[in-house]
Image: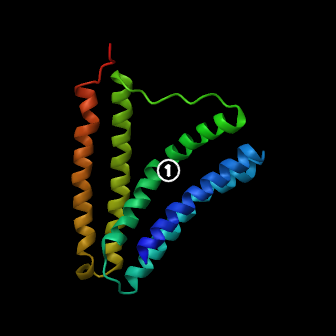
Amino acid sequence: MIGVFIIGCEILFWVFVLAGLSARYLFGMKRTGGILLLCTPIIDLLLIAVTMIDLRGGADAGFMHGLAAVYIGVTIAFGHRMIQWADARFAHRFAGGKKPEPAPKHGAARAKRERQGWYRHVLAWMIGVILLGVMIVVGEPARTGQLKAMALQWAVILGIDFIYSFSYTFWPKKQAG
């Protein structure tokens, strides 16, 4: 049930983003577009509420409950950046906006971009771990062991991402030729 809800929330996120950008650029309704884009955090609140209700109702915490916390952490940390990315491309394609700059592929600019991505990942992890902790308290600790394991697994992934992201700082990729 929670897994289907998470998928639905991800779909709703992009529906609101596309509706907001369409209203803004295709129909010239900037205010309506802005309101639709501001609705995306409501999806996160709905997801966390349903997850907490499910745990409070006696469900054993599983991978999908933990995934809800991960999803919310990632959405909060990366959501604004994703919307800006989509907005720039939508403006270019449909409103005569300037062509978006491609992501840097080499040197210090690439290293900086990779580090910034890792910092956002740390923020997502911190938010997710706080939510996992709240879920552990809301549910019964005996039924929430999976959530503790998920926090540790995510920490390992964060460590791997650190190595990858900072490798561009210590060994910058050079431009060919």
* Residue at 28%, 29% in the rendered image: 168
Q: Nearer the viewer, residue 167 or 15?
A: 15
45 or 60: nearer the viewer = 60
Where in the figure is residue 139, as x and y percent of width and height? 33, 80
Please state, as top left, top right, bottom left or bottom right, where the N terminus lies in the image: bottom left
Quarter of the image where one finds residue 147:
bottom left
Is residue 49 shown above or below 170?
below
Location of the C terminus (image quadrant): top left
Find the residue positioned furthest to the top: 177
- At label 1, the amino acid type is Gly
Residue 110, horizontal then vertical, whole percent: 37, 28
Which residue is farthest front? 177
Find disc 1 in the rendering and name its residue.
Answer: 79
* Image: 152 above or below 122: below
Residue at screen point 42% across, 74% down: 2
Residue 161 to residue 3: above or below: above
Where in the figure is residue 59, as x and y percent of width and height? Answer: 35, 84
Q: Which residue corresponds to the image point at 53% horizontal and 61% vertical from the top-left?
A: 11
